[in-house]
Image (cartoon, helix red, strand yellow):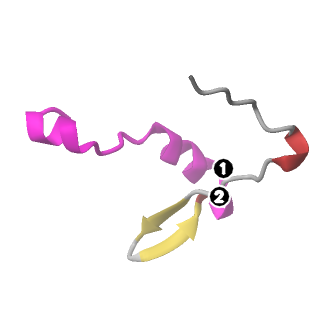
């Protein structure tokens, strides 16, 4: 049986998300608010859905 505890807030680090745009890798945090909103609305690729023929 595994016993895990949540890390205290002081031990956590912010995870920076990067994405490829027009051939360049950029952090999403550097996008303007409109592009950040567009990024949140994107459909993400999953191998299992692609193999099954779903979007």
Judge by depth and name the residue closer to the eye, 26 or 11: 11
Judge by depth and name the residue closer to the eye, 22 or 50: 50
Stretch in magenta: 29-55
Q: How many marks overall? A: 2
Q: What residue sits 38% from the left and 76% below the top?
A: 23
Question: Seen in the image, is 6 located left or right of residue 10?
Answer: left
Residue 1 coordinates in the image, percent (x, y) = 56, 22
Q: Residue furthest bottom?
A: 24
Task: Tell me the SS state at disc 2.
Answer: loop
Mark carried by residue 24: none
* Residue where numbered disc 2 is placed: 16
Q: Residue furthest top?
A: 1
Asked if the stretch drawn in magenta spans residue 5, the answer is no
Q: What residue sits 11% from the left and 40% below the top?
A: 51
Q: Residue furthest right?
A: 10
Judge by depth and name the residue closer to the eye, 8 or 46: 8
Please, is residue 24 above or below residue 17 in the view? Answer: below
């Amino acid at each position: 049986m595994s016993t895990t505890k949540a890390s205290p807030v002081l031990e956590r680090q912010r995870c920076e998300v990067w994405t490829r745009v027009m051939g360049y890798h950029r952090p999403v945090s550097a996008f303007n608010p409109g592009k950040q909103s567009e990024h949140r609305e994107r459909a993400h690729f999953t191998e299992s859905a692609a193999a099954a023929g779903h979007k």
